[in-house]
Image: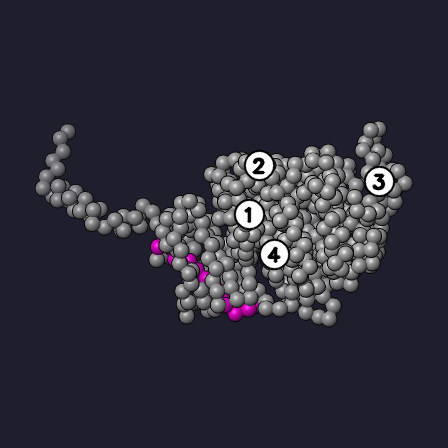
């Protein structure tokens, strides 16, 4: 059947073509529009600034607007940047000139327009100017391939931390391809239960092996510079190593506490290297930075943040924590003792267990150094504890669910305090809290026995008598690791 297009049809088609040719902006609004692919996410905090990260949908200008008024009665325009393909369209904004300990509402404009999927502004808060009461959540091992729902973030939001620390294996990239790492970061930023936390609370991160490279990878990795370039555009830390020494290490001060985030991968010697004075996890420059910053710190608490645990628990075949870098660990602990640097304790991840361990340095003139481990956030828990013997387990290991650690600081009174708890997927605390004061973390002060659970002390005594730590006698040929007496290797 023939169609009679006619003059009217021709004119109508011509009009449509003329509209398309003359109004590319109108067509773009129908077929596509500037917006956020992922984010926004709040990054490194400060008393007078906030940091905002976002990944845009194209290479166009993005502007931050903010206000102390939720309704934006007064709009303050912040910085503008243009997203670039070579940065995976990721942008990090530092908004300056803010007041300490103050709520700010912020929103982003993409090529001059708001995001049609984020109608409402987001709220965050600047850091306090001095000592404060605050909470820090932390965890590690977040594998979206294992758990795309990640219910642990419901518990984290209910705990209402002031900051969230990511301690490594934040993605399970296990790839030498930049695009694979970027894809997994992007997928992780879109988890529904997580996004409210990202948009409101500062997020700080280090890496471990699975987001640095392949499993157990070290400083010999030929892909480490590429992995670092991806890490830097997808996180909003205050710094990345030093100008002439790249990495993910940095210091963050908040509320009267100094946090020292360590890079345990970029300069690490292979695990198989004999554990002597030459073997390093940090590398010479990062270790010198850590010692210098610890010696200069005047805060009552100083927190070492590491991807792997500080205890000797993984001093075993296949271990890749500080347990197989004990000589360097003890060198750092000796430095803390010899310089009379008080208030140091550690947090860590990676083990797929919740752990609260202690290295009893009071026995060699120092003080007992505690290590709080939270793992995993979204991964299968493990029961590696049955074959491991750390110096002291202060609490039993937690392997029944994913978990998150919570540090509650009160730096406002005459006696600063830290209260530590570990929380399961429903938000319930799984142990009795551990409370520390600066007096507990002073040379020649012994606390580990009084602060450990009686059941853990009984297990330790059994082990020291030659029995199995968890009630199982050692198998023939099982490596013998005598109880650590605090002496340096």
Q: Is residue 472 left or right of residue 138?
A: right
3D distance between C-alphas at marks 4 and 2: 25 Å
- For label 3, the residue is 482
Q: Which numbered disc flags the more N-terminal residue, 4 or 2?
A: 2
Mark 3: secondary structure: loop
Q: Residue at x 79, y 47 (%)?
A: 488
Magenta extent? 98-111
Q: Residue at x 48, y 57 (%)?
A: 52
Where does residue 285 sit, x and y in percent of width and height? 62, 49
Q: Which numbered disc flags the more N-terminal residue, 2 or 1?
A: 2
Q: Which numbered disc flags the more N-terminal residue, 3 or 1?
A: 1
Mark 1: secondary structure: loop
3D distance between C-alphas at marks 4 and 1: 14 Å
Depth check: 114 or 141 in front?
A: 141
Q: Which numbered disc flags the more N-terminal residue, 3 or 2?
A: 2
Q: Which numbered disc flags the more N-terminal residue, 3 or 4?
A: 4
Where does residue 241 sit, x and y in percent of width and height? 57, 51
Q: Residues within 10 Å of mark 4 (few under 14, many from 20)?
A: some
Total marks drawn?
A: 4
Q: Which mark is residue 163?
A: none
Depth check: 485 or 381 in front?
A: 485
Where does residue 297 sit, x and y in percent of width and height? 67, 61
Q: Residues within 10 Å of mark 1 (few under 14, many from 20)?
A: some
Q: Which mark is residue 246?
A: 1
Q: Quadrant of residue 5?
A: top left
- For label 4, the residue is 251
Q: Which numbered disc flags the more N-terminal residue, 4 or 1?
A: 1
Q: Quadrant of the C terminus?
A: top right
Q: Residues within 10 Å of mark 3 (few under 14, many from 20)?
A: few
């Amino acid at each position: 059947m023939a169609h009679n297009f006619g003059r009217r049809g021709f004119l109508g088609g011509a009009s449509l073509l003329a509209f398309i040719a003359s109004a590319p902006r109108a067509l773009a609004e129908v077929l596509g529009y500037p917006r956020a692919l992922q984010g926004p996410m709040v990054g490194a905090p400060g008393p007078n600034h906030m940091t905002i990260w976002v990944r845009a949908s194209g290479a166009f200008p993005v502007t931050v607007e903010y206000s102390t008024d939720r309704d934006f009665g007064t709009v303050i325009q912040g910085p503008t940047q243009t997203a670039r393909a070579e940065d995976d369209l990721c942008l990090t904004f530092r908004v300056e000139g803010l007041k300490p300990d103050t709520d700010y509402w912020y929103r982003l404009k993409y090529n001059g327009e708001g995001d049609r999927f984020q109608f409402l502004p987001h709220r965050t808060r600047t850091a306090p100017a001095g000592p404060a009461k605050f909470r820090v959540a932390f965890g590690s091992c977040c594998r979206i391939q294992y758990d795309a729902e990640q219910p642990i973030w419901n518990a984290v939001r209910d705990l209402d931390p002031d900051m969230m620390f990511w301690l490594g294996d934040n993605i399970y990239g296990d790839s030498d391809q930049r695009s694979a790492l970027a894809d997994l970061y992007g997928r992780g930023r879109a988890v529904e239960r997580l996004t409210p936390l990202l948009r409101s609370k500062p997020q700080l991160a280090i890496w471990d092996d699975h987001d640095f490279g392949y499993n157990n990878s070290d400083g010999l990795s030929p892909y480490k510079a590429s992995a670092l370039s991806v890490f830097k555009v997808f996180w909003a830390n205050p710094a990345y190593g030093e100008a002439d020494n790249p990495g993910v290490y940095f210091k963050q001060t908040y509320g009267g506490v100094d946090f020292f985030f360590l890079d345990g991968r970029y300069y690490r010697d292979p695990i198989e290297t004999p554990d002597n004075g030459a073997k390093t996890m940090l590398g010479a420059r990062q270790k010198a930075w850590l010692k210098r910053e610890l010696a200069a710190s005047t805060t009552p608490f100083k927190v070492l943040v590491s991807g792997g645990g500080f205890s000797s628990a993984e001093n075993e075949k296949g271990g890749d924590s500080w347990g197989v870098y004990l000589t360097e660990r003890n060198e750092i602990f000796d430095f803390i003792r010899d310089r009379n640097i008080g208030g140091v304790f550690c947090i860590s991840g990676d083990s797929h267990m919740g752990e609260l361990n202690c290295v009893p340095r009071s026995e060699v003139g120092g003080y007992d150094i505690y290590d709080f481990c939270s793992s995993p956030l979204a991964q299968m828990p493990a029961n590696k504890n049955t074959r491991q013997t750390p110096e002291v387990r202060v609490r039993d290991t937690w392997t029944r669910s994913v978990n998150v650690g919570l540090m509650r600081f009160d730096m406002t009174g005459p006696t600063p305090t830290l209260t530590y708890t570990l929380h399961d997927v429903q938000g319930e605390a799984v142990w009795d809290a551990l409370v520390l004061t600066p007096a507990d973390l002073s040379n020649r002060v012994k606390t580990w026995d009084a602060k450990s659970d009686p059941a853990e002390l009984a297990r330790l005594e059994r082990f020291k008598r030659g029995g199995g730590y968890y009630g199982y006698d050692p198998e023939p040929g099982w490596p013998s690791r005598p109880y650590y007496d605090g002496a340096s290797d």
